[in-house]
Image: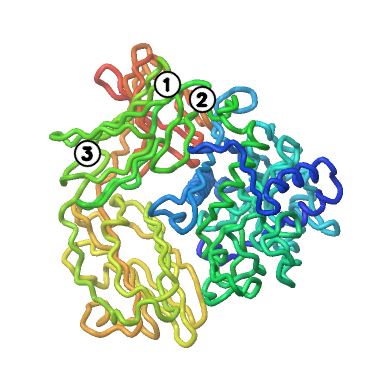
Amino acid sequence: MAAQAQQKHQCGTDGLHDHKMATDAVYAKRMHDFDARYTGGNIKKGPQTAGTYVIPVVVHVMHKGEALGVGTNITDEEIRNQIKAVNERFRKAAGSVGDGNGADTGFEFALAVRDPQGNCTNGITRTDMTNVALYMNNGVQYDTNGSGITDGALKALDYWDSNRYYNIWIVSEFDNGMSAFSGYAYYASAHGLSYDGAVILSDYFANSESITTTHELGHAFNLYHTFEGDAAGTACPTVINGCGTGLGDCCLDTAPHIRNTDCTTTGTNSCDPTNTDLSFKHNYMTYSVAYNCQNMFSNDQKNRAIDAATLIRGSLLAANGNMSLVPPALTSATFTISTSIVCLGNSVNLMDASSCIPKNYLAESAWAGINFTWTITNGTGMYVFNTQNVNFTPPVAGTYSINLAITMGNATFTTTMANAITVLSNAESVQACIPDPGQVGNFGYSVNNVVFNNINNETPLSIGGYENFKCSSATSVYTGSTYPLSVSIKSGNSYTENYRAYIDYNNNGSFEAGEMVASGSVPNLTAQTFTTDVTIPANAVQGSLLTMRVIGEAIDLTDAEVACTAEFYVADIEDYGIYIMVPLGTTEFSAKTITMAPNPANSLVTLSAQSEIESVTLYNMLGQVVLTKTVNATQSDLDVSGLSAGTYVVHASAQGKTAVLKLVKQ
């Protein structure tokens, strides 16, 4: 993902829109009529109301036959992360990637929970394109002289009624890579038609840092590029505050300008010298020569998008009878936690992960007719929350159990995760070894991404000095298990960049030669990600938060620097928290009274018993809880569609006994 983070968004919407305006009279009239509301400075707003506009989305992954998570076959988690990032940007969510300037648009996007046949869905479809040679060789055709499957042919393979769902197709490339766009979308004039929707390259959609999806969804609700009318980047728009295709973006609070702006630009706007408002350079609907410095929609863009949603795309809204975000039934209650290990004073995110329940992945969400109750206990205190997702800051050290109850109508499902969170008070780091703080932010010598188990921490490409992530980025691991450690480093203009990673297994406050778990170096002007397998030794200290230190240093990294007895040159040092536990025993037994089928399974697996099953817990082979469910019935379906392929241990409890079964997820 580090390489993707350097991609620059380019949009293919204009070419398709211009073609439709020239060849499709109905499409053109819809657009002209809508833009007429914004001409001459006499803006006529639609019947806007304060609140949230939630758009049901279906994502069609058009993959090349790869295994899930490989190449174009992006994972459910990557899709959910993109939806979350889009919502953070449209809602200007505090403390998130969308926490910038501008307006909270009130728009949210949620994966559909009801498919066209009225069944539960996760809002994601997958189409294996290996039998479509034109796609396999070239992707999607964009240019009339290009190569690939046509836009229409692509969408005909997997399409849901665009009156009820906003369709997004995830694809491999355009014109065999010759058209350098990251995606495109049709304006609201296409609403209800079979070609309506967005088409986005898989690597951009899988990268939640990319603003491509946010940008294309802006087009879907009739937001022009802020540089509309710049003659393909060759001249300033001829009309100040113009409105319409080739004229302007119809928003008075975005100054006319030429595309490919620089986010560091100061002074006056060359297209409007009297206007010192340069906020357009941060707008999601512009291009920037810097990656992802866009962080805002303007207030006029907000109002225009709401008009598009209410006047043209109104059939997508639940207020107008759309049932795409109304669950057909309540099937189970499940949740995820951001970390099972946390230092006192830090928070844990609890996210509802129940199947067939709509989600916006934001801290605040509400769905008509669905109620959530979280009960968190540590033996002495009880903490109750009634939102879909919870950001919980444990008040004291100890172990916390979590119960989630979801009610819809007369049905209530509950699940409990015992000892879900361990809160530590002893999180002191070893000696900090702080490099020269005057170098922070300078040069290009850095450790910029560390991935280890559920730690995934990206930091700037410039020098960061010493940073202590021990409490904010911690993970639990098991003795005898092996985990990949990925470290991304970058060198500057003149020198090599070296790195070493250590885990203080004996918790003695120093990093010894036997505790080095990874190392590497790159020559000048090079960025590279190193991946090393780390096996946790049986004699490692357990029950304490240990320190994993990753050190990057230019020219040479010496043992004396590691020991903090010599000065660094231009170092980047990061500490992380590692909590070591003993894995689950591998001894298995099964109660003859409990059965599980099918096994292997792809999506649903049914547990049946002669007597009532009280609860079910799924563990991965490291002993980590991945799913819990309170059953209290003789039969229950488990939705495992969101789990990665592999082997899981199922604990089914009944009448005071626990049956342990092995499940293979395909």
Residue on which the image places disc 3: 400
Relative vertical location of residue 389 with respect to residue 181 in this rendering, above or below: above
Q: Is residue 130 left or right of residue 355?
A: right
The location of residue 305, given as percent across then percent down, is 60, 46
Tell me where residue 379 appears, x and y as whole percent.
15, 34
Mark closer to the chain start, 1 or 3: 3
Whichever of callouts 2 and 3 sits on the residue coming sooner in the sequence is 2
In the picture, residue 283 is in which quadrant?
bottom right
Which residue is identified by label 2? 327
Q: Residue at x 36, y 60 (%)?
A: 534
Q: Is residue 103 something that shows in the picture?
A: yes
**Gap between marks 1 and 3 measured at Cα:** 27 Å
Say whether residue 336 is left or right of residue 207. Answer: left
Relative to 13, 562 lies left or right: left
Per the image, label 3 sits on a secondary structure element best described as strand
Residue 340 found in image quarter: top left
Viewer-nearest of discs 2 and 3: 2
Three-letter amino acid code at disc 1?
Met
Q: Secondary structure at mark 1?
A: strand
> Answer yes or no: do the residues labelled 2 and 1 have beta carbons within 8 Å?
yes
Residue that label 1 marks: 408
* Kind of residue indicated by mark 3: Tyr
Q: Nearer the viewer, residue 146 or 511?
A: 146
Disc 2 to disc 1, C-alpha distance? 9 Å
